[in-house]
Image: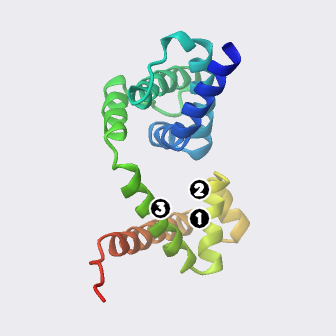
Amino acid sequence: MLEKLDLDLQGLLSAEQRAVVGLGWLLMGSHSAGEDLYQETCLEVLRHPDRCPRPPEFGRWVYGVARNVARRLQRAARSGRATPLTDEALEILADAWARRPLASQDGQRSSALEACVAQLGTAERELLVLHYEEDHSCAEIGRRTARSEDAVKTALSRLRARLRDCINRRVHRPASHG
């Protein structure tokens, strides 16, 4: 019975993976931190299966667990170099994330993002991969691509603006009738 419960929870957690990783990225500042948050959240949920509500409350409950785990991870990571977010800021961000657009809107934006990224040149896509998928700092990307750190920051800023504009054009494009 416990194995079936674990499988059910794993399925529910898998359905929330993208949202929890995104919440982690938002709260903690990197994709890898978001992945860590998801893993720690899964462990926490699987340790206490009796506390889990069933859908549709499960998703919102997992965000609360993830928010608490993020706080714990931030406290553990305090090193004096970075100022962690306050509990109030964590609450605001987590609540905003929980009210994010519906999956259909999110899927539409994801499709638009894929199409917009496909229009970019190879060097621009490489820059995005190095920063967002491989989680390299701007300084490291600069060393790899023979650019200054400031040039990398500027290029990423311009790419984000181009992608944002492209996504907004695609998502808000009037439907063609024909």
Q: Judge by depth and name the residue closer to the eye, 28 or 51.
A: 51
Q: According to the image, label 1 marks what residue?
A: 128
Q: According to the image, label 2 marks what residue?
A: 132
Q: Quarter holding the C terminus?
A: bottom left
On the image, which quarter does residue 77 sit in? Answer: top right
Amino acid type, callout 1: Leu
Q: According to the image, label 3 marks what residue?
A: 110
Image point (62%, 33%), residue name: 36
Residue 49 shown left or right of residue 84 in the figure: right
In the rendered structure, are the residues bearing label 1 and label 3 in contact, judged by CB atoms less than 8 Å apart? Answer: no
Q: Badge 3, how many Cα within 10 Å: few under 14, some, many 20+?
A: some
Q: Which of the two discs, 2 and 3, sits closer to the camera?
A: 3
Q: Earlier in the sequence, mark 1 or mark 3?
A: 3
Q: Which of the two discs, 1 and 3, sits closer to the camera?
A: 3
Q: Judge by depth and name the residue closer to the eye, 149 or 50.
A: 50
Amino acid type, callout 2: Tyr
